[in-house]
Image (cartoon, coloured by chain):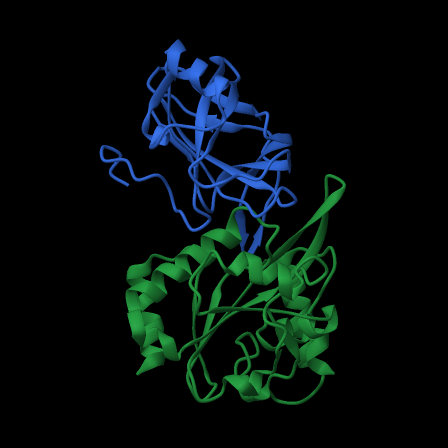
Chain colours: A blue, B green
Amino acid sequence: MRTPILAALLSLVGLPAMACETFTIGNLMIEHAWSRATIGAERPGVLYVEITNTGSADDALVGIATPVAEMPMLHETVVTDGVASMPHAMSVPVPAGQTVALAPGGYHGMLMGLTTTLKEGEGFPVTLTFRDAGEVTVPVEVLSMQAEGPDCEHAGQ
Amino acid sequence: MRTRRAVILGGVAGALAFTLGLGAWRSRGTAPATDPRLPLPIAEMDFTLTDQCGATVRPSDWIGRPTMIFFGFTFCPDVCPTTLSDISGWLEDLGPEADRLNVTLISVDPERDTPAVLSDYLANFDPRITGLTGPLAEVERAAAGLRASFEKVPRDGDYTVNHTAGVFLFHPDGRFASIIDYHEDRRFAVPKIRRTLS
């Protein structure tokens, strides 16, 4: 799995449909890492990704880092009595045998302090830090601002 | 200005704020014609905002066509693009039928969302969506009429805005029709909209 990671680190311009590649670290499978295009760099960007824990022990996503944002953090959108708020999430649980999705309207990475405009069709690397499995760097595909997720044939989305 | 009192802006939790707001509203002594938890008919709303092209918009402008209203702001990376994307999808499903709809985003962050900012932002979504902004007091009046709430929250040296996430639907005569909940499946959302079109 070194080659795709290296490729992602070497270039900010990604390959088409890279959000459909699968990356693994230990018992974790990382898929569908995507983001939405931004207007300029003043507004925060977003990170969505799916993590499947094929092992028998619980893990947790405890941090994210990327060269395109000075202050990336984990957030959760919560709708209480019809009002949406976005509290910090200290970590996102990845229970044994389950798939956890950072997805629109739920957990998401909030990329504050963008260093560049996120343009549709481009990509950037993100390093996910797990409590037990450690760090893995995956490429993130920037989709349109209207996107609801990558269109992967095998993904059944 | 009884409607102003229904909007609680501050650090009180949403449910409590709603209860208090309701109490304040009720304590004015006039019997409400409709359920006070529900949005007013458009004809009873009163505010003046500016759209992304700089034109003045008042609720009375919407009477005669079905209307869809929701709140948001362009600095929000998750909820707002998701809502706008959902709505763009619903409008696409409805096709030319939806041309008659007033589809309106009201910014809860008028400080940063100028008409020009809204214009840039909305260019990424269905062109039938209009964005409104204006003085904070006018946005508060709009929220009061819709029984919606929003609250500016400091965050990491910056701020975010918590806000009502549903989409409000009104009949062509301005009567309140229904609410589409945040991220509601389009199998339910599209028929709700269609009912306001017939």
| Residue A156 x, y percent position in the rendering | 24, 38
Where's the C terminus of chain B, which quadrant? bottom left
Can residue B189 be spotted in the picture? no
Image vertical order of residue B32 relative to residue A51, above or below:
below
Can residue B9 be spotted in the picture? yes
Q: Is residue B177 left or right of residue A68?
A: left
Report the number of discs: 0
The furthest residue to the right: B157
Which image quarter: residue B1?
bottom right
Q: Is residue B142 left or right of residue A109?
A: right
Of residues A73 and A125, the one nearer the viewer is A125
| Residue B75 x, y percent position in the rendering | 62, 50
Q: Is residue B78 left or right of residue B113?
A: left
| Residue B79 x, y percent position in the rendering | 51, 51
At x 52%, y 54%, the residue is B80
Image vertical order of residue A107 relative to residue B164, above or below:
above
Image vertical order of residue B43 relative to residue A97, above or below:
below
| Residue B156 x, y percent position in the rendering | 73, 39
Of residues A108 and A96, the one nearer the viewer is A108
At x 35%, y 39%, the residue is A150
Which image quarter: residue A41?
top right
At x 74%, y 59%, the residue is B10
Of residues B104 and B79, the one nearer the viewer is B104
At x 36%, y 66%, the residue is B91
